[in-house]
């Protein structure tokens, strides 16, 4: 079996027996969810998909839709415009809290219900058009045409009075850009869209990939919108459990009462989990356990990549006063710093040396390294000639399209 | 000039003219701070220090001490024990908010005052011993013997009634492990410790480096404590501005009313900034601007490393049914996935091939890649012989000491 | 001029010059109110009406309707049933606060908007029928057919999103007994009913008179409902200013943003004031000043009737061992106590005396006095004969119809 | 048996079997209270005392001390000065809530702990002197020298950290006029003063009597202070149950965790109850039941004196154009209105009549009646001669000493 699949299968196996938690019961359709259902999927930014358990079982997306609709709003209107109606601060309160900011009336963030309704209402067009725009976008994130579970939609609509209250409250504060009933109707339909664990993994992978779906190759939202969405997921995604989530899991994530969770390893992959029993905060019990273990065992915590790499200096050869530096690896701040120190020492020890910096074996140059290497060469110009062997153009790459993938740049060049 | 220094000097130059904000005025000692003072320092996990402006000017550490004392408490007592008295959730409220969790009485997190006082009170010994333990630890983080500004201490002690209230409140909830007045006294002295921007940079670099001071080489706190501290800084470090900070800067950070800010790029470096004028949330205006710009320009946001690296497969050579894969770079999930796909294709296309995977030019293998490569080789054992050329022992490295640096492992081996 | 009218005219004269406060501006119809308009009316429980200034000017009743609709709900459903949906506790918060009780979801009291909407929704029938029932009741309180200001109604309906939010919130809590939109529509129409200061005075007098309109002689609500309504007005009537109102005015009252205030001196009279400029709490500035002065000067504070009356013993005459006690006044606890002490002393000093207690000149016997006098006579039966001369039947009056007026009892007897 | 005693004995008998509630357990001294202990006492403004059950059993006064110390502060500093540090608004929150007013930092009212500590700290002198001043005053209210239960005091002091927190919080807000620890120490001692149900009844009777102890005849606080205290007890006395208390009992009251309750019928009497088992709001279960029943059965609710008195016109005799009005009773607004109507009709029907208004049988003339009668006479001066037969000086009584009792006026005249 394929090794990623092995990892997923083991996790499903290990956590299947955990029967803690209860399925959501506020509408009969959710109460009927199978507490044994348990699916896990992972999709890499290269578009490969892996899965285990009931990863193809359908369930309603519920609150997992919130960050994706937020990214759509950001992509359409820009952060400044969106930020006038909804903030980015964790509220320290449950998902259905009122949490409107004193003074502005903005909901605290787009992942509590009040903020999600305001966000949904930012999508243009009449109710029908707005919903179709949202469905198209979620479908673009998932890479397939998503449909609505009409029973769940009707049931949510029939019982969604607290959400209607939040809609009218934000309307009265001047931050809801649509009639309250219509805003709720679009929101209820958005929450009733059916997905699978694989869909959530593809959706997460699209955010991980800067907004471009790695399976279909299509851009869904722009890279800034994807990045901002990941930030908000990191601080607010797991409701009043978000701080502990960051501490213990360290991946941006979002849960829904349908039992779905989508987590993202930025630049690497998305994960989708489906298991209906929820903890008291409304997060899927098995999904939390699986993601915590996955993060700990495989070192995925975004703030704990503390393993230091080998030196980027594979070899420094000197021949007749000409120095040849063979570099290796993925050059970030630490690697660039080491290279700069080496080059400056060579320049100090000898009058006007020729220094060749060979990046042939380098896999990536991060912006900070690019800046330091270029500044280093420029700064020594009077005393040294620094020449880059850079077949992949890593140092010269313009900084403006930092977020694009090579394929995308090629596509645009056509 | 050295290129990192150039970057810092430019930032100081560009933001010196920004005169927004006001110095803290609640005690005369802080009100006398020079609003023009402005220092910036960066220290890498390799122990190199860079600075610009008034980076050697002394000021009181104030709330910037909180995460470091939290890491000490975690290091001494472990997360479970500490978590019984103080949570990890952003409170959505100002720094001096009461924010005690219903039911447990725990302060929401260790970076609001109530949580910081509870944390400080966890350090063992009588008041004097506890303070010296804290000072030793902060000195260990800074790499030099730190002293207390006695005037500031006396002034804080004279006006700290709200903090005393918080101490008694947590005492009454059973989460303060020390007499309230003594807890406050230690806390006031801790806040009055004098540091410089360079000190804060070294302290941040120590957290970036998994708890080992990269300048002195001495371990200060354990790696788990350092990692947990960074997580709490990421979600709660900038008070009720933490969500926006994550969105716009994306680095764990902590500010103090003395005008200091410490930010951390995990695995890379620490930054210290000193500029007394504060915004209404109590964060240094220039420090916020400088860090925002530094992050954006140099791509430091922890959730936005979305630039894809080159393929790790430098070359795949086949000779008489033996395949030689030359790998490059820093192998994370994406690289490992690509290698695994390649190896499995070779194993599929031909009966019992010999596959040599050459890691000579690889700079790092992240835990997830190590797992996938090892599983891949094991899974194909029946059909293929996979051999690793791994002079640096990257694949075989045991996972238990994941957080240690090579130097540390060497040290321990002695 | 009639002396009550003189008092009112003087008050209007004295406070006319006070131009503090601002008319409500949230809808244009209220913003157009004349800030100089100022009317004052008083109606006694005997049905006499007095007025000064613009007491016949029409304005919308707004929140002054709330206690009257509450009394209707109490009268129809009883306190226990109403109390399941709305509490009686002051909320310490502004009028449009959310203030739902944790656990039950009940609004704190019927005089904040959330509680008023829930109360209005308790009135039976469809929306139209319920509104007509409310209008009939308010008309019954006012003693004339009241009409709706359709412009104000439409404007309130167009801008009432916060109230709709409160309606949906209470609906989601299970305490709203009617569709939210319909409940709001009835509520908006109720608030747009037009009244005058004289109307408010008659309405207040009806509550003062135990629920029977003293002008028309018709019972509007039962005595228990009227009493409970006065209690809630006393603790919650002036929003987050209710405590100070009790301290400084000491009369149950209710204000509205239209500039109207209704105050009640239980058992004595109702007062209506109209003056549109409001203070920041939303209470009419001149109305507050006038009522404060009226209460202070004329000793109307319900908790400050501390002036002790003369002895109820006008004369005690003894003739041949027969004692004749001539009583005077309104017999409450203090008077009854004095009489009982006298009777018992007479009984102690002499074997089997005849004691005649003459109530011919007594104006009232409160329940506590009735009980004490009856018990005294019964208790001494073995040793004394106590005979009551009681032409008005004051002592023998059954306690069950305590709240009825003599006229009412007569009416019922027919 | 004396009839008031009969009433009390019956109440004790009827409620003795009610074993609901739990004694306070936060300190061992209170936990040892006998749950069966049950005492009831009533003291009239004429100084007669009645009791039943364990009315002489001693217990600590606890929060029942709060209104009495508030009245002392008001008496010493005046309302304006006190109101700068503590408000009068019900907080809608439990007794130990923080409830500081935004902006001013004032505790919401003097009957929550924060407000009580601030109030206690207003009493002048050092800690010892202030406490003695408080003890003297409470002793003055009780009419005997009160002592402190030193065990309870020490235990409260040992566990009073939440109160210390409240003290420091108010100190930091600038409303506590004394070092926090000293303020708490005085407060803890005040709460540990021992009283009996009889003491509480005398204390309540003193407030009922305008601040003069009716048993000792000594003035304790001025009448304005007593009146203001009753107002605050009416809206805030029973914590977050105050609204329901007003509705169901309608008497100003204050409870303490020691099981004591003091209730006041203004102008009539005080009641003291002692029964340790408390309901979840911290109010004595049996005391609440007894007072509710007492109020309902004996018509004591301050807002429900709706029983109309007989006409004050005992007789109107006309002889040769001279009219003689014989008045009866306690003349309030309603009676005065009736008299005025009569006099004005006589004046209208006949040129220059002589009208004699005979107040010989009148027991009291309330300020509003005095004003109306005087104005009526003055207004008719041109057309009628109105002469008052007023042997007790009821109409001419100057309004300034409205709150004094006849005995007091006599005393002062000496």
Image: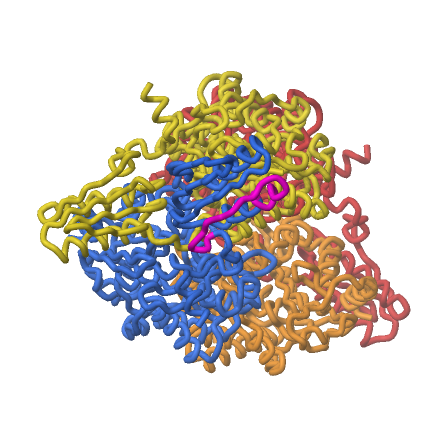
Chain colours: A orange, B red, C blue, D yellow
Q: Position of residue A89 (x, y in %)?
A: 51, 54
**Is residue C4 visible from the viewing direction of this image?**
yes
**Is residue A316 visible from the viewing direction of this image?**
no
Residue C378 colored in magenta in the image? yes
Outermost residue on the right side: it is B382
| Front residue (pair B98, B249) | B98
| Front residue (pair C100, A407) | C100
| Front residue (pair D221, A283) | D221
Instruction: Name the residue: 45% across, 51% down.
Output: C390
Q: How many marks?
A: 0
Instruction: Name the residue: 26% across, 43% down.
Output: D358
Outermost residue on the front side: it is C320
Magenta residues, start to end: C376-394
Q: Is residue A177 above or below residue D210?
A: below
Q: Quadrant of the N terminus of chain A?
A: bottom right
Q: Position of residue B396 (x, y in %)?
A: 81, 51
Q: Position of residue C381 (x, y in %)?
A: 61, 44
Q: Position of residue B91 (x, y in %)?
A: 55, 48
Instruction: Name the residue: 73% across, 65% down.
Output: A22
Kindly indicate the quadrant of the structure image that contains residue A42.
bottom right
Residue D284 colored in magenta in the image? no
Left or right of residue A366, residue D395 in this image: left
Q: Is residue A361 above or below residue A209?
A: above
């Amino acid at each position: 079996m394929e090794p990623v699949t092995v990892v997923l299968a083991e996790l499903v196996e290990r956590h299947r027996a955990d029967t803690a938690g209860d399925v959501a019961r506020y509408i009969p359709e959710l109460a009927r969810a199978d507490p044994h259902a348990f699916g896990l999927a992972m999709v890499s930014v290269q578009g490969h998909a892996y899965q285990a358990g009931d990863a193809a079982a359908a369930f309603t997306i519920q609150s997992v839709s919130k960050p994706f609709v937020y990214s759509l709003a950001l992509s359409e209107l820009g952060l400044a415009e969106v930020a006038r109606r909804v903030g980015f601060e964790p509220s320290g309160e449950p998902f259905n809290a009122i949490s409107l900011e004193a003074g502005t009336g903005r909901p605290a963030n787009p992942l509590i219900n009040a903020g999600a309704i305001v966000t949904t209402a930012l999508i243009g067009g009449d109710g029908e058009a707005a919903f179709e725009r949202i469905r198209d976008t979620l479908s673009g994130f998932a890479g397939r045409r998503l449909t609505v579970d009409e029973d769940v939609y009707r049931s949510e609509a029939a019982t969604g009075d607290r959400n209607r209250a939040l809609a009218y409250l934000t309307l009265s504060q001047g931050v809801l850009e649509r009639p309250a009933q219509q805003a709720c109707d679009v929101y209820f339909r958005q929450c009733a869209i059916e997905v699978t664990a694989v869909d959530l993994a593809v959706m997460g992978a699209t955010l991980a990939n800067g907004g471009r779906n790695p399976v279909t190759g299509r851009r869904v939202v722009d890279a800034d919108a994807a990045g901002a969405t990941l930030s908000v997921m990191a601080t607010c995604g797991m409701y009043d459990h978000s701080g502990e989530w960051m501490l213990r899991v360290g991946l941006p994530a979002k849960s829904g009462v349908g039992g779905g969770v989508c987590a993202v390893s930025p630049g690497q992959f998305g994960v989708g989990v489906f298991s209906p029993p929820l903890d008291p905060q409304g997060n899927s019990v098995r999904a939390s356990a699986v993601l915590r273990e996955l993060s700990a065992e495989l070192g995925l915590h975004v703030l704990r990549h503390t393993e230091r790499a080998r030196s980027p200096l594979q070899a420094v050869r000197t021949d007749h006063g000409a120095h040849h530096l063979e570099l290796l690896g993925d050059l970030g701040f630490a690697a660039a710093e080491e290279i700069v120190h080496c080059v400056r020492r060579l320049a100090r020890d000898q009058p006007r040396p020729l220094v060749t910096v060979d990046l042939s074996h380098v896999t990536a140059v991060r912006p900070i390294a690019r800046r330091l290497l270029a500044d280093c060469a420029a700064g020594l110009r009077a005393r040294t000639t620094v020449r880059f062997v850079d077949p992949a153009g890593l140092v010269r790459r313009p900084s403006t399209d930092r977020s694009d993938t090579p394929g995308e740049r090629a596509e645009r060049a056509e």
